[in-house]
Amino acid sequence: MSCLACESANQVEFSSEIILHFAALQTSDIPRVELFPKFLVCLDCGFTGFNFSEPELASLAVDTQTAERLTRQAHP
């Protein structure tokens, strides 16, 4: 597969760990979200892409809905 930005074939896949925090909230009610995507990095232009697994997407959806609800309660 070629790079989406520059069409180079010079790409490398890296394992990663991402921890997301909902920084807009000053509450500990929402835990951090730990994700482990694989990054595909173009070594020519630096374009990077990644995908989350279905369980990770589901976790993001639930935590995002909770964060939005708590933000609305804190800032009516």
Image (tube, rainbow, N blue to C red):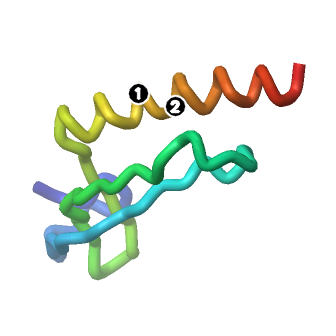
Label 1 vs label 2: CA separation?
5 Å
Q: Residue furthest bottom?
A: 43
| Quadrant of the image occupied by residue 7 | bottom left
- Amino acid marked by disc 2: Thr
Q: Residue at x 46, y 53 (%)?
A: 32
> How many numbered circles are shown?
2
Q: Quadrant of residue 61?
A: top left
The reply to whether dot 1 and dot 2 touch (C-beta < 8 Å) is: yes
Q: Position of residue 12 (x, y in %)?
A: 16, 75
Q: Secondary structure at mark 2?
A: helix
Residue 61 disc label: 1
61 sits left or right of 75 in the view = left
Whole-percent x, y for residue 44 in the image? 32, 80
Quarter of the image for the N terminus: give it.
Answer: bottom left
Q: Hey, what amino acid is under mark 1?
A: Ala
Query: Which label number is shown at residue 64?
Result: 2
Q: Position of residue 50 (x, y in %)?
A: 28, 54
| Percent position of residue 72, x then y | 77, 21
Residue occupying the point 82% across, 29% down = 74
Q: Residue furthest right?
A: 76
Disc 1 packing (10 Å; few <14; some 14–19; many ≥20): few
Q: Decide: few, some or many residues near mark 2? Use Cα within 10 Å; few <14, some 14-19, many ≥20.
A: some
Q: Residue at x 78, y 22 (%)?
A: 73
Residue 8's label in the rendered image is none
In which quadrant is the C terminus drawn? top right
Q: Residue at x 87, y 27 (%)?
A: 75
Give the side of residue 59 with respect to residue 65, left or right.
Answer: left
